[in-house]
Amino acid sequence: MSPKNNITVIIPAAGNSSRFGGSIPKQFLSLGEETVLEKSVNFFLEISSIKEVIVAINPNEHLIKSQSFYNDARVRFVEGGSTRSESVLNALVEVDQSIEIIVIHDAARPWLRRSHFEDLLHQLNNDQSVAGIFPVIPATDSLRMKKGKDLIPVEREQFLHVQTPQIFYYESLKEAFNNLKKENLHMSDESQVMEHAGFKLLAAPGERSNIKITFSDDIANFAGRDFRIGRGIDFHQFQPGDGLTLGNVFIDCELSIVAHSDGDIILHAISDALLGAAGLRDIGYYFPDSDPKNKNLSSLIIIERSLDLLKDNGLWPRNIDFVVVCENPKIGPYVNQIKKSLSAILKIEESFIGVKATTTEKMGVIGDGNGIAVYAIASLRNKE
């Protein structure tokens, strides 16, 4: 299977959020700069292999018109049903016959990571014996089964939580839902529909961060899931020269930096901070100094590669802060230029960039004027 531009995503979003409470459905609540539904839909619109996203919505829901994706050419809307099964079936009727893969994802599950989604696609592609895949995570709390008035202890190891996205071959899913319609049945998720029709599925490891918003408490601490923090540190020696580049800004002085690349120590430290916040390897892993191709490499390439890795994981810089430590040259006169330069590179506002400089008060190697250090910290947000 090579599902290039041959995937349709179905997002059932017709629920009234009865368990969540509140005056508006949970899918239209704001998470920072986007609503829950915008995060879920826009995630898929950033992936080129997704041909279209079909949203099943209550026809009387006026809030849908205010969503950022409402006029996107790749988004279509169908009338949602009174049950999830009805909503998905209404969407399936509208799917183009040329589509090979159907992805079904909860509207209120906005923290899906791209690497997780692509891994699920990869696993389905590699197992030709199954008609679909769905993610699961182990139960961690103690469990009891309600039986009449009694609560019976059960072994939690025997139970799994089922998540989305659930991914299926279109023809198999259509057949399963047609059977369900004939039997006049409704089921809580599509994996049950497929297995009821006799199709073999693959249960794959899910991710705990990919939670579904069900109750108001689920959304209370969303900010903690929406960003990460990392730090980067870099040191370099000085040698006599005719200037150096910091933050892609040229500093006119009688020094240069000893480095395998172009020696932009600010971009190096920031890159490591960004990669660390994303749980990735450092720049030495991606750009080893043992590789001749990296000799005199522009640090712009290093940080652009770091940003690409963040984007692949659905992340983007939120803010950065760093300290440059050296006796000379004096960084203060260049602070505004460096902030402006980094704002353009990172595509974040200058007000989200902290630039500071200090000395070691003549102590140590750096205090002797023989080197420079940068200590950087960065936070990430989920990419819009």
Image: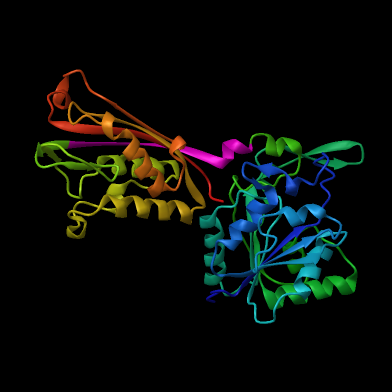
360 lies above or below 83? above
358 lies above or below 334? above
Secondary structure character of the magenta stretch overall: strand
Question: Whole-percent x and y of residue 42?
Answer: 61, 57
Indicate left or right for 283 with 145 as reference: left
Residue 231 location, quadrant: top left
Indicate left or right for 306 with 115 as reference: left
Q: Look at 68% across and 43% down and name the residue there.
A: 30
Does any portion of residue 196 appear in the rendered image?
no
Question: Whole-percent x and y of residue 64?
Answer: 76, 55
| Residue found farthest to the bottom | 98
Does any portion of residue 373 appear in the rendered image?
yes
In terms of depth relative to the viewer, which is nearer, 300 or 114?
A: 300
Residue 225 is covered by the magenta coloring: yes
In terms of depth relative to the viewer, which is nearer, 8 or 281?
A: 8
Q: Name the quarter where the N terminus is drawn.
A: bottom right
Q: Look at 57% across and 75% down and name the residue there.
A: 128
Q: Look at 76% across and 45% down and name the residue there.
A: 26
Residue 50 location, quadrant: bottom right
100 lies above or below 114? below
Question: Whole-percent x and y of residue 322?
Answer: 35, 32
Question: Whole-percent x and y of residue 363?
Answer: 17, 19
| Range of residues picked out in magenta | 222-236
Give the colour scheme of this rendering: rainbow
Q: Look at 52% across and 66% down and name the residue there.
A: 122
Indicate left or right for 267 with 17 as reference: left
In terms of depth relative to the viewer, which is nearer, 6 or 248?
A: 248
| Residue found farthest to the left | 240
Residue 39 is covered by the magenta coloring: no
217 lies above or below 158? above
Residue 339 location, quadrant: top left
Count of number-bearing discs: 0
